[in-house]
Image (cartoon, grey):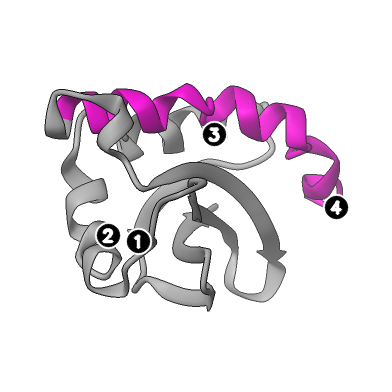
């Protein structure tokens, strides 16, 4: 899997987790997509060969005129892990398809929300592969 970085390009990441999914999430949550304070983007971080893990983040990017409040984002890993619009199980299955038989995704975990900047928080998605 030396070419993982070449597989998970910005275009592929947007295909895996389309930008409009954030609006769909807020529509389901609040009944109005405009109520959402952030956009969600999938970012590839690394392939840790020694641990056989792919590391991505779900980046929460503050929308203009909104506030990305820490206390609202820290509970999101639990919400994201089971929300049907976010669909982490489906996302991991789609990531496995992109690996085209080079590896199988055996497990995944959403980590704790980290505060990167005032307008950016990230939720790590770690996928174990074999």
Q: Residues within 10 Å of mark 3 (few under 14, many from 20)?
A: some
Query: Magenta part of the protein: which range?
Result: 1-28
Name the residue carrying label 3: 96
Q: Earlier in the sequence, mark 1 or mark 4?
A: 4
- As drawn, the label of residue 110 is 1
Q: Is residue 103 left or right of residue 71?
A: right
Q: Residues within 10 Å of mark 4 (few under 14, many from 20)?
A: few
Residue 47, quarter of picture? bottom right
Question: Callout 3: helix, strand or loop?
Answer: helix
| Residue 65 in sight from this viewpoint | yes
Q: Earlier in the sequence, mark 2 or mark 4?
A: 4
Q: Position of residue 92 (x, y in %)?
A: 44, 38
Question: Callout 2: helix, strand or loop?
Answer: helix
Mark 1 and mark 2 residues within 8 Å of each other at the beta carbon: yes
Q: Residues within 10 Å of mark 2 (few under 14, many from 20)?
A: many
Name the residue carrying label 4: 2
Mark 2 and mark 3 residues within 8 Å of each other at the beta carbon: no
Mark in the foreground, 2 or 3? 2
Residue that appears at 41% across and 49% down: 106
Q: Position of residue 6 (x, y in %)?
A: 85, 41
- As drawn, the label of residue 27 is none
Query: Does residue 118 belong to the magenta stretch?
Result: no
Query: Does residue 11 belong to the magenta stretch?
Result: yes
Report the Cα–Cα distance between label 1 and label 4.
Answer: 24 Å
Question: Callout 4: helix, strand or loop?
Answer: loop
Q: Position of residue 96 (x, y in %)?
A: 54, 34
């Amino acid at each position: 899997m030396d070419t993982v970085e070449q597989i998970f390009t910005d275009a592929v990441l947007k295909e895996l987790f389309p930008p409009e999914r954030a609006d769909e999430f807020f529509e389901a949550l609040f009944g109005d997509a405009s109520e959402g304070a952030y956009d969600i983007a999938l970012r590839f971080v690394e392939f840790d060969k020694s641990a056989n893990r792919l590391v991505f983040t779900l980046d929460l990017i503050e929308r203009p005129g909104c506030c990305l409040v820490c206390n609202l984002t820290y509970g999101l890993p639990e919400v994201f892990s089971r929300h049907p619009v976010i669909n982490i199980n489906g996302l991991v299955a789609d990531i496995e398809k992109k690996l085209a038989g080079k590896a199988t995704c055996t497990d995944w975990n959403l980590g704790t929300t980290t505060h990167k900047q005032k307008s950016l928080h990230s939720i790590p998605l770690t996928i174990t592969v074999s």
